[in-house]
Image: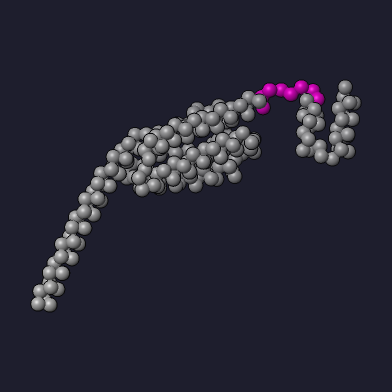
Amino acid sequence: MKGFIVSILVLTLGLFACENDSQQQLEAQKIARKNEAVFKNISKMWQFHFPNARPEVKATLNSWNEWRQFEIEMLQKPKSTLSAFQLKTKNLSSKADTLAFTIPFEYKKPQVLSRITTLNTKLKSLETFMNLQVIPEQKVAKLIPEINEEIKGLYNQWDEIIIKKAIPKEIGEELMLQALDTARNARPSQMNEKMEISNKMK
């Protein structure tokens, strides 16, 4: 009798296990189909654009190794699986981290650093969304054009720096700007010297 009960118990557990396995297989197939659909949609959306730069900007960007690597990484679209996109976003995020630290001196301006930080934040958001168990496609679809806008904004900012640099300064303008710079003129004696020099030039 005990043997009979044990065998029924084993059979019941076996049936439960088989049922669980088949249910898990169905779930896995469902997730795989969904991931494949997500992969196709994201693959269609994944388009990043880098504007044509002015020759002066292009020369600087060509010598800025980290930017070139970042651009190459952005333009290479993953082709195989969703995990390739996840790895891509991780790489993009880490490459974007280095941009603010390696920026060329002439572009080390608050407005450029701000744009790089914003771009970096958006790339980190993209990485986060891509690594969620259920990828929010709408958020990814919204984020990609925003990233493109930030890239375009960076190029515009660099153009503006070049344009401003080309505008000739008037006589005494440099001294006036230095006198107005309160951070540099924290010492009154130094400020008085500059004002005397400025008065002599008049």
Task: Where is residue 59? Give x, y as percent.
Answer: 57, 33
Vertical relation: 16 (above or below) 46:
below
Q: Is residue 74 visible?
A: yes
Q: Nearer the viewer, residue 5 or 95?
A: 5
Residue visible at 52% across and 38% down in the picture? 119
| Residue 124 shown in magenta | no
Span shown in magenta: 165-172
- Location of the C terminus by quadrant is top right
Seen from the viewer's position, the closer of residues 148 and 2 is: 2
Horizontal side, residue 99 vs residue 90: left or right:
right
Q: Quadrant of the N terminus?
A: bottom left
Front residue of 106 and 126: 126
Q: Nearer the viewer, residue 66 or 117?
A: 117
Q: Give how far across and how far down residue 129 sits, in percent.
A: 41, 43
Seen in the picture, residue 31 relative to 46 is either above or below; the reply is below
Residue 192 lies left or right of residue 178; in this view the side is right
Residue 72 visible to an observer of this rendering: no
Q: In the image, residue 131 lies at what x, y percent?
A: 40, 47
